Image: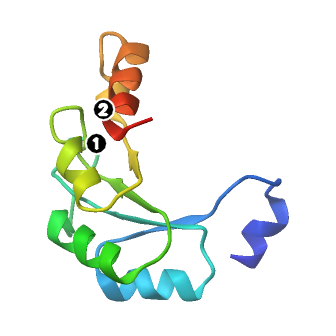
Amino acid sequence: MAAARKVLVPGQMIGTSNHAMQEALVSISEEVDYVAVGAIYGTATKEVTVSAGLETLAKIRGEVDYPIAAIGGINASNIGPVIAAGAEMACVISAVGMASDPEAATRELVALIGG
């Protein structure tokens, strides 16, 4: 993390991807700015070898006082439970990148998150 922080400008954040509570706790000990949890759902973007799911997301939210980003298979039809489980952010690729109107897809996701 120290090496990454040397090249960041103010306002940029560092996070790590985690699929279990123990990984999230290690991330925090490394002084990340946020914790990413996933994969929440299956995704066609990459092969998911270990799934975290909503239950793990909720458990991490209950123990961690850091911003949480959820990742993996998130789209407008399933983002509600992700936010309800405790994520403040969602990392998406296909939901926007594969949309016929990426701007509209982004606006819809932001609205669903509450932004």
Residue at x 62%, y 63% (from the top left corner): 14
Q: Is residue 87 left or right of residue 75?
A: right
- The N terminus appears in which quarter of the rendering? bottom right
Task: In this rendered view, identify the residue nearer to me: 46 or 41.
Answer: 41
Q: Earlier in the sequence, mark 2 or mark 1?
A: 1
Q: Quadrant of residue 21?
A: bottom left
Give the residue pinned by disc 1: 45
Task: Note whether 84 is above or below 101 in the view shown.
Answer: below
Does residue 94 appear in this view?
yes
Q: Secondary structure at mark 2?
A: helix
Q: Position of residue 65 (x, y in %)?
A: 47, 76
Is residue 92 depicted above or below 68 in this figure? above
Query: Marks 1 and 2: in contact by CB < 8 Å?
Result: yes
Identify residue type, mark 2: Ser
Residue 57 in picture, x, y percent from top left: 26, 68
Q: Which residue is mark 2?
A: 94
Side of 35 relative to 32 (left or right): left
Q: Which residue sits at x=40%, y=22%?
A: 107
Q: Quadrant of residue 49?
A: bottom left
84 on left or right of 9: left
Three-letter amino acid code at the position of disc 1:
Thr
Residue 28 position in % (x across, y down): 53, 82
Q: Tag 1's secondary structure? A: loop
What is the distance, in whole Å, between disc 2 and disc 1 at their CAs? 7 Å
Q: Residue at x 48, y 88 (%)?
A: 26
**Residue farthest to the front?**
114
Local packing at callout 1 (Cα closer than 10 Å; few below 14, some 14-19, many 20+) is few
* Quadrant assignment, res 104: top left
